[in-house]
Image: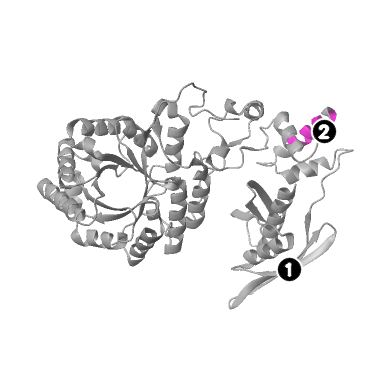
């Protein structure tokens, strides 16, 4: 069904004012511990951000390292469409380096910053207020000789004296800044406070209406998204954010959450994002895969459970009318569909629906018998998978199970310190044994290449998760994979004391689900 922008159907839409999205995944997001990216990975993310149609990509901090400089330089050369931004402190050498990295950008921006809170002035900068004002003016003026698009940030603005903050902003505007950014650098401010800060700036700073007012909120108290929304409600028109909320400490405001708040409640906010929302999920997965930082399952919008339902009452409502328990559709952000999770809280309606999808139409007495067996198993397992349903079907007289398209016959793997991993895999494919020897970066990669060749699949491995069921070196390895092909996503699972064999079982299990 079609979803209204506010979850309710309205008549005439209000013309929406544009909010500018400044993505800093490649700069502030990369500062997440363990999230370091190489140049090629940064370029991949930048290309996807351009597809997502963000307005500005902060590609890095050019003076921070040679790698950062080269990444900004390459992104400036390759990416067209969004503004490409480089960060610089308020020093000439920083600004020179940023300009050098941005030379080939279609639309370059230099972003310079200095702290304005008394705690930063005293303990970090060891500067007076007058020195900060003078430095801010000279930095913006100096950057202006290189590019016309200058952003100035007052670091730790949230904890700054408002009168002094206003004076610094006025000075930066007079020097030529075209965007003024107000960061809640340590995630300390509440939405009401932050809204007041933005409203006072809009009301009291001369020239503020001639430039773009921006915000950059951190999530230390879990308020980054709420503060960003409060800011736009009070006149800010640029939001600085990251994919999956990556960033220093607890991270930044999450782009996907802010976008979908404004899109889902468009009739309330009357603000347009310009974001291609069906690229959100793809962007989230790319960033997660390249940084190695897994998205928490209950993360809003892009978490594995964001469009998943287990409770029987919810599942029944969803099957009758999606808007009963969903305010947006999974398809909107680029997912194939929502997910009804089968577990001990599931009801007959969801169970019957899943069996129908698997190709089974059970009579009422068969369904009742199946449901009782399902409940017994669900009390023992957190989640019931398709293979579990098929095993239950085996005990119901008159119901035949679907034969597996692929069965593992044998597998031989070789690898070593100076040897490229190889895997010889033989599968039963519709009664015929087919074999292929594949190689890869590791034994599991080699096995998966061999299986892919035998089956002819074009699927993409989206996630690979390993956990031990028991302790010790002889522990049972439990492997779960997420596989996508032709806009269909399935999960496969394999268990074995041999982790490579468990991995093969999980992948074959997923491929069989794709066939079904």
User: Residue shown at 73%/44% (left/top)?
Assistant: 386
Q: Position of residue 55 (x, y in %)?
A: 38, 46
Is 368 part of what is drawn in magenta?
yes
Residue farthest to the bottom?
418
Snapshot quadrant of residue 334: top right
Could you tell me if the residues under marks 2 and 1 are in contact, i.e. CB atoms within 8 Å?
no
Residue 221 visible:
no
Mark 2 to mark 1 CA distance (whole Å): 39 Å
User: Is 2 one of the magenta-colored residues?
Assistant: no
Q: How is the image coloured?
A: one colour
Q: Decide which of tag 2 and tag 1 comes sooner along the chain.
A: 2
The residue to which callout 2 is attached is 362
- The residues colored magenta run 365-375
Q: Residues within 10 Å of mark 2 (few under 14, many from 20)?
A: some
Q: Position of residue 455 (x, y in %)?
A: 73, 59
Q: In the rendered image, which quarter contains the N terminus?
A: top right
Direction from residue 507 to residue 62 in the image, left or right: left
Q: Which residue is mark 1?
A: 436
Q: Nearer the viewer, residue 291 or 241?
A: 241
Q: In the visual, does 131 lie left or right of 275?
A: left
- Which residue is most to the top? 11
Camera sees residue 263: yes
- Where residue 96 appears, as percent x and y from the top left, is 23, 61
Count neighbours of disc 1 (C-alpha within 10 A) and say few if under 14, some if 14 to 19, many if 20 or more.
some
Above or below residue 484? Residue 411 is: below
Residue drawn at x 21%, y 55% is 143
SS label for mark 1: strand
Position in image of residue 321 (x %, y %): 63, 26
Image side of residue 96 versus residue 74, left or right: left
């Amino acid at each position: 069904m079609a979803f209204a922008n506010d979850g309710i159907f309205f008549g005439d839409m209000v013309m929406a004012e544009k909010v500018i999205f400044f993505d800093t995944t490649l700069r502030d997001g990369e500062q997440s511990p363990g999230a370091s990216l190489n140049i090629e990975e940064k370029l991949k993310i930048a290309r996807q951000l351009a597809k997502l149609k963000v307005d500005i990509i902060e590609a890095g901090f050019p003076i921070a390292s040679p790698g950062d400089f080269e990444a900004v330089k390459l992104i400036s050369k390759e990416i067209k469409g969004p503004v490409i931004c480089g960060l610089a402190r308020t020093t000439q050498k920083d600004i020179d380096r940023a300009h050098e990295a941005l030379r080939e950008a279609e639309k370059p921006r230099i972003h310079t910053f200095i702290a304005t809170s008394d705690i930063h002035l005293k303990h970090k900068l060891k500067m007076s207020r007058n020195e900060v004002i003078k430095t801010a003016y000279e930095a913006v003026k100096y950057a202006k000789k290189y590019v016309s698009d200058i952003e100035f940030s007052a670091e730790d603005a949230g904890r700054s004296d408002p009168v002094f903050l206003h004076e610094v902003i006025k000075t930066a505007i007079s020097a030529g800044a075209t965007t003024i950014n107000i960061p809640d650098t340590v995630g300390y401010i509440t939405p009401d406070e932050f809204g007041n800060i933005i409203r006072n700036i809009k009301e009291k700073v001369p020239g503020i209406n001639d430039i773009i007012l921006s915000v950059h909120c951190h999530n230390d108290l879990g308020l980054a998204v709420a503060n960003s929304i409060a800011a736009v409600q009070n006149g800010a028109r640029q939001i600085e954010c990251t994919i999956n909320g990556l960033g220093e400490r607890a991270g930044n405001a999450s782009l996907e959450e802010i976008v979908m708040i404004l899109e889902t409640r468009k009739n309330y906010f009357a603000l347009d994002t310009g974001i291609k929302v069906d690229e959100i999920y793809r962007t989230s997965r790319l960033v997660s895969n390249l940084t190695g930082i897994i998205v928490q399952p209950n993360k809003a919008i892009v978490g594995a459970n964001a469009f998943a339902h287990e409770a029987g009452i919810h599942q029944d409502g969803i099957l009758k009318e999606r808007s009963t328990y969903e305010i947006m559709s999974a398809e909107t952000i680029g997912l194939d569909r929502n997910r009804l999770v089968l577990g001990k809280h599931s009801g007959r309606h969801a169970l019957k629906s899943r069996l129908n999808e698997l190709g089974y139409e059970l009579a009422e007495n068969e369904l009742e018998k199946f449901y009782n067996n399902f409940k017994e198993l669900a009390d023992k397992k957190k989640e019931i998978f398709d293979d579990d349903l098929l095993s239950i079907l085996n005990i119901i007289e008159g119901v035949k199970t679907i034969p597996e398209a692929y069965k593992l016959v044998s597998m031989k793997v070789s690898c070593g310190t100076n040897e490229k991993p190889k895997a010889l895999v033989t599968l039963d494919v519709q009664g015929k044994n087919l074999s292929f020897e594949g190689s890869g970066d590791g034994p599991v990669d080699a096995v998966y290449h061999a299986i892919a060749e035998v089956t002819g699949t074009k699927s993409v491995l989206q996630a690979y998760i390993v956990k031990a069921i028991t302790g010790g070196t002889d522990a049972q390895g439990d492997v779960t994979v997420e596989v996508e092909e032709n806009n269909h996503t399935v999960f496969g699972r394999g268990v074995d004391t041999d982790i490579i064999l468990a991995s093969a079982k999980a992948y074959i299990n997923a491929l069989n689900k794709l066939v079904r």
